[in-house]
Image: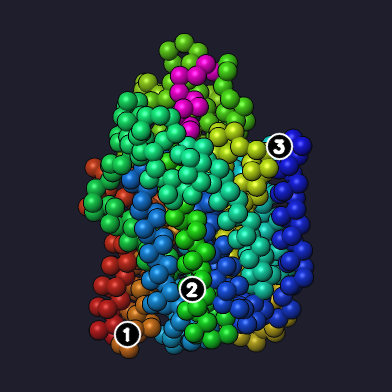
Amino acid sequence: METQTLIYIFVGLSFALYIGIAIWSRAGSTKEFYVAGGGVNPVVNGMATAADWMSAASFISMAGIIAFSGYDGSVYLMGWTGGYVMLALLLAPYLRKFGQFTVPDFIGTRYYSSAARVVAVICLIFISFTYIAGQMRGVGIVFSRFLDVPIDLGVIIGMGIVFIYAVMGGMKGITYTQVAQYCVLIFAYMVPAFFISFLVTGNAIPQIGLGSTVNDGSGLYVLQKLDLVLQDLGFGAYTDGSKSMVDVFCITAALMIGTAGLPHVIVRFFTVPKASDARKSAGWALVFIALLYTTAPAVGAFARINFIETINEQDYSEAPAWFKNWEANDLIAWSDKNGDGKMSYRAGDAFEGKPEFTGTTGASGERSIANMPSTDSDNEIYVDRDIMVLANPEIARLPGWVIALVAAGGLAAALSTAAGLLLVISSSISHDLLKSTFRPQITEKGELMAARIAATAAIVVAGYLGIYPPGWVAQVVAFAFGLAAASLFPAIFMGIFSKTMNREGAIAGMVTGLLFTFAYIAWFKLLSPETNNAAHWLLGISPEGIGVVGMLLNFAVAIAISRVT
């Protein structure tokens, strides 16, 4: 059977499964819509939480970032996994014990303030829409390549799928859909990792394969070979970092603290029967997450080796089929700068506005590179980092069914998180703004209808952000974590552990942290991308790590205001 036919079958069956679960578990009350009735088993909730949290950034983009940035990519591994431990130990049990439906609900009730609730909703919407842009971008990339449609149309198709099971099923439908999505995505991630690890090193376990010797008779270990190959091509050593220590620390801390402040992850702990179950589900989720996160470094390293060996100095007329497939979607491209007909992969940017990794990051998001001018560097190949995991099976010439499985897994990862974020947005608008603030007399039926309308509107906005994203998937998601660290986390943390924190301090802190962090990110990523380098950053801290400074400002302003009011 042809690979394309297998892709249609795998993706079609997975979509039918998700939609079937949504119809079977359709929410009939606001409690089922917001927290799945509050009776989800801890193991089931752990699996759903893992799927909710392991977004397109984890499945599609993280290994690609590691493949191209090497040591610098470790900040994503350390930050995201460490943050989950912090969330499980510090916040989840206490929030579950408090007994509210949403994060703004907790903040509004804890600080006895509708204003604090509204500010929390605003922070949540900023965070969620920034996060969801990355997910919809991931959906578009998967659809564009594997279903042979433009990225924009792929985003729209993804919007339609999410609309069906998020708007109909609510948290109840999403929970059981995410269990299925976790099974799909982890199987889709691990199977090609086993294959490729065995092909490259002779060891089928990727975590061990990363520390093994390469199957080419050189006697070199995987990372040794990568260092030598990349340095020969003008890149820095794979195992050397180009980021400053302060930036590495701040990005890791922002991702870690941001994880503990992400509303769509926190709300999952409201779905279990009691506080002790919240701890158990957090532990199970960490086990499920570790399967992918301990595999990602190996996948990234193997992908870079295979990519270079497959492409560098090959005649374009004899380019492998996978290159032409991705080239059709403008996610990889070649510019014959020296006229020899061969594809030369070197350090530097191949096209203006389409950066190859050189130790810093640049602007991204253009929709076409067909007419973009080349740069003066020797590099002739542009490759989008977000395609590496998806293209890996094709590069390694794995069977068609593995390629189809990866397509289904990438969609599962992106759609699971997108659904969770959309639910958080809709419940905040319907429950926190309407029911708890502006229209307390609204009926349960009216509130449920408002939640579904809000989810529909959120899907439309999310689709727009997916079509015009401000960066790569993992990059965009990192911004969301920074916003969460700077705005919601301090208010939640002090709400749990400080008896003296009041509403004036919490509101002032959230506003300060959100505005500072958002302004910093917007300036360097949207308004003045040409200045986005260490020479212009505050204290050498990149936009991905500035959430730590925003968090410190939040704490400082909140404590100061609470002392004088």
Q: Position of residue 209 (x, y in %)?
A: 44, 45
Describe residue 138's horizontal placement relative to residue 165 as left or right: left
Q: Looking at the rendering, in which quadrant would you find the N terminus?
A: top right
**Residue pointed to by mark 1:** 498
As for residue 312 lying within the magenta part, the answer is: yes
Q: What stretch is highlighted in magenta?
A: 306-316
Q: How far apart are marks 3 and 1 (CA)?
A: 58 Å
Of the numbered discs 3 and 1, the one sitting upstream in the chain is 3
Describe residue 401's horizontal placement relative to residue 368 as left or right: right
Packing grade of label 3 (10 A; few <14, some 14-19, many >=20) is some
Q: Distance between the residues labelled 2 and 1?
A: 24 Å
Q: How is the image coloured?
A: rainbow
Q: Is 82 above or below relative to 95?
A: above
Packing grade of label 1 (10 A; few <14, some 14-19, many >=20) is few
**Residue pointed to by mark 3:** 3
As for residue 332 lying within the magenta part, the answer is: no
Residue type marked 2 = Ala
Asked whether residue 259 is in view, the answer is yes
Packing grade of label 2 (10 A; few <14, some 14-19, many >=20) is many
